[in-house]
Image (tube, helix red, strand yellow):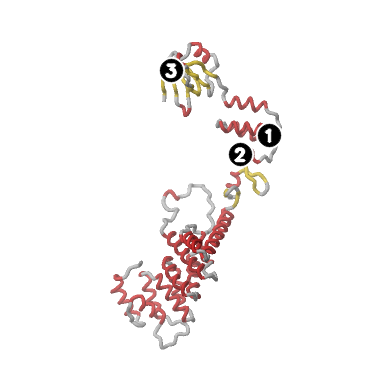
């Protein structure tokens, strides 16, 4: 951008510019109307004008007759050199103050020069070390770039650590917060109880899954209910979020060495086992009433497999019935054929009078409202004819 300001000072002012030995940084042009322009002053494009380069390279052309005076300023780099040379060799405070002055004027190389002088005086000065890219690691100063490249460390809340250590700290924080909220969920104060439950149901940190699973066997009835519900809500929200890492934007740059983050979630099998174990052992009617809804939100194939295995193999008839309750909550149309095939199994303790697995037969009757006994072909034919009537919720 180039603008023309009419009126420039006498020719003597312009001659003063020519005799100054060339352009100087941060000169101040005082105009007769009281305004002023600060920038680099040079000859203008026309006789009787001067050009002032201001912020971001914008150029102003001013007529000499409008200028009252040009105030010469030293170039910041030159002023730095003069001030730097006048400082005593052991004046740490003075050098640090000069480094701050250089930073304000965007003189990065001069700023680094000052900090290097500080380290010559005091090799452990924390300000100079930090500004020159050093960090403390194992009680010694190490370049931050080396901590990343050679040690695979990351910076977290002011400390350098491995990704695993960062994850451990975050997990500890989540564990404490979840424990506090669950304590509040069991409070006698209705306001604290309502607040804690809502916070838990809205929790979205995937680390909470592992923590919540650990509370499924808590002796407090309310805690077991809320833990199951909060885990299910978190699992359901996670299932609705598109997975990261797909598409062209997710491809790693060639040569980039990015360490894999530690696992922060329980495996699907681990979660399924924890919920099935709770279903098999739970005696509280209130908790048992809450578990199916939680399991339903998991939509877990591993849970179906484990529960079906219990129905087929368990010697405990109560466990077989409880496993059937779990399957009732998660059953999908795609899995019905496997359930029908399991009719042929006879669990331990079931006498030869039964033609197959009574728990499976009872479950099929409850789901579809018909009883075709242990006749697997009849069940499959019925399912082929009627499956269009059913849908997965």
Q: CA distance from mark 2 to mark 1?
A: 15 Å
Q: Mark 3 and mark 2 in contact (Cβ < 8 Å)?
A: no
Residue at (43, 59) in percent of width and height? 237
Residue at (40, 83) in percent of width and height? 356
Q: Is residue 140 left or right of residue 357?
A: right
Element assignment for label 2: helix
Residue 45: mark in rendering: 3
The residue labelled by disc 1 is 92
Q: CA distance from mark 2 to mark 3?
A: 43 Å
Residue 204 vertical position relative to residue 325 in the rendered view, above or below: above
Q: Residues within 10 Å of mark 3 (few under 14, many from 20)?
A: few
Residue 187 vertical position relative to residue 99 in the rendered view, above or below: below
Residue at (44, 54) in percent of width and height? 244
Residue 70 vertical position relative to residue 365 in the rendered view, above or below: above
Residue 251: mark in rendering: none
Q: Is residue 30 left or right of residue 91?
A: left
The residue labelled by disc 2 is 131
Sequence-wise, the earlier of marks 2 and 1 is: 1
Element assignment for label 3: loop
Q: Position of residue 70 (x, y in %)?
A: 52, 18
Quadrant position of the N terminus in the picture: top left
Decide which of 178, 73 is in the foreground and name it: 178
Element assignment for label 1: helix
């Amino acid at each position: 951008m180039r603008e023309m300001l009419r009126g420039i000072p006498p020719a003597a002012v312009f001659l003063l510019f020519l005799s100054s030995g060339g352009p100087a940084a941060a000169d101040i042009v005082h105009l007769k109307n009281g305004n002023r322009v600060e920038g680099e002053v040079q000859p203008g494009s026309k006789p009787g004008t001067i050009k002032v380069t201001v912020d971001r390279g914008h150029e102003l052309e001013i007529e000499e007759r409008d200028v009252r005076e040009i105030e010469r300023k030293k170039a910041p780099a030159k002023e730095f050199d003069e001030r730097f040379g006048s400082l005593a060799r052991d004046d740490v405070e003075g050098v640090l103050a000069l480094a701050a002055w250089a930073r304000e004027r965007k003189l990065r190389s001069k700023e680094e020069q000052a900090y290097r002088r500080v380290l010559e005086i005091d090799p452990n000065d924390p300000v100079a070390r930090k500004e020159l890219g050093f960090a403390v690691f194992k009680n010694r100063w190490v370049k931050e770039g080396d901590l990343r490249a050679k040690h695979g460390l990351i910076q977290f809340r002011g400390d350098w650590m491995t990704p695993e250590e960062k994850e451990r700290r975050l997990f500890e924080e989540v564990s404490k917060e979840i424990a506090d909220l669950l304590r509040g969920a069991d409070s006698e104060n209705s306001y604290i109880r309502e607040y804690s439950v809502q916070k838990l149901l809205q929790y979205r940190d995937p680390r909470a899954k592992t923590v919540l699973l650990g509370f499924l066997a808590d002796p407090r009835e309310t805690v077991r209910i809320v833990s199951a519900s909060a885990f299910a809500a978190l699992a359901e929200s996670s299932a609705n979020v598109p997975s990261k890492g797909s598409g062209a934007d997710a491809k790693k740059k060639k040569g980039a060495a990015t360490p894999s983050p530690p696992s922060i979630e329980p495996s699907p099998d681990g979660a399924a086992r924890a919920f099935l174990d709770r279903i098999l052992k739970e005696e509280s009617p209130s908790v048992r009433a809450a578990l199916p809804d939680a399991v339903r939100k998991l939509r877990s194939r591993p849970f179906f497999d484990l529960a079906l295995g219990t129905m087929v193999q368990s010697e405990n008839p109560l466990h077989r019935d409880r496993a059937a309750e779990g399957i009732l909550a998660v059953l999908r149309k795609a899995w019905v054929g496997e359930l029908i095939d399991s009719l042929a199994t006879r669990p331990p303790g079931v006498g030869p009078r039964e033609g197959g697995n009574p728990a499976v037969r009872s479950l099929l009757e409850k789901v579809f409202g018909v009883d075709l006994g242990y006749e697997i072909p009849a069940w499959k034919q019925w399912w082929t004819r009627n499956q269009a009537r059913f849908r997965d919720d």
